[in-house]
Image (spheres, rainbow, N blue to C red):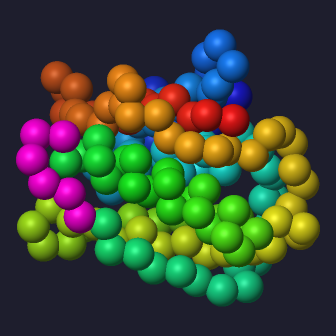
């Protein structure tokens, strides 16, 4: 499944042995993170025109040479947590930059029972070969393997 085009923002889902590989791209780090979250949701549910019943905000911070990949992992793990703990799925996703390289993840959540489940739910994010960084043109690329 591919959403968007290579010139703008989007994502792609790719089979990966017994797991799932997601890839996302966008002009900014924040939009790239949001696209990766949308890809994760699209891997197991169709939210369609669902209207969020509540919003959840989470500040995500990371430091060091893998900070952006760590932010990607944290954003994806937040979706898995919301699914497992509360039975909720993000229908709307936005990511905003904060001071010091941190981001705010905002999820417009809907109950899992109100969406069409299309695949196995995600279990965890593999830290092996996780990536979130700009390419030589400045476009941000993210990729991660998801245990399903």
**Viewer-nearest residue: 30 or 75:** 75
Which part of the image, by quadrant, shows the N terminus? top right
Residue at 61% in and 34% down: 147
Indicate the quadrant where residue 96 lies. bottom left
Residue 100 position within the rendered picture, expressed as x and y whole percent measured from the top left = 9, 67
Residue at 76% in and 69% down: 87
Which part of the image, by quadrant, shows the C terminus? top right
Residue at 51% in and 62% down: 78
- Is residue 49 rendered to the left or right of residue 76? right
Residues drawn in magenta: 61-66
| Residue farthest along the top direction in this orientation | 17
Tell me if I can see residue 42 in this picture: no
Residue at 78% in and 59% down: 47
Tell me if I can see residue 44 in this picture: yes
- Is residue 66 rendered to the left or right of residue 141? left
Residue 106 position within the rendered picture, expressed as x and y whole percent measured from the top left = 47, 73
Dominant SS of magenta comes to loop
For the image shown, how many numbered marks are present on the structure?
0
- Is residue 33 rendered to the left or right of residue 62? right
Residue 95 position within the rendered picture, expressed as x and y whole percent measured from the top left = 39, 65
- Is residue 45 rendered to the left or right of residue 32? right
């Amino acid at each position: 499944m591919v959403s968007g085009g290579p010139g703008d923002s989007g994502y792609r889902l790719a089979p990966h042995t017994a797991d799932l590989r997601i890839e996302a791209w966008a002009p900014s780090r924040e939009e790239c993170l949001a696209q990766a979250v949308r890809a994760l949701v699209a891997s197991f549910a169709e939210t369609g025109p669902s209207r969020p019943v509540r919003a959840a905000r989470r500040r995500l911070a990371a430091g060091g040479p893998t900070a952006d990949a760590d932010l990607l992992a944290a954003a994806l793990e937040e979706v898995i947590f919301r699914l497992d703990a509360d039975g909720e799925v993000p229908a709307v996703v936005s990511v905003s930059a904060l001071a010091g390289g941190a981001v705010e993840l905002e999820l417009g959540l809907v109950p899992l029972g109100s969406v069409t489940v299309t695949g196995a739910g995600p279990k965890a994010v593999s830290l092996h070969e996780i990536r979130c960084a700009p390419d030589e043109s400045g476009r941000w690329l993210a990729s991660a393997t998801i245990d399903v």
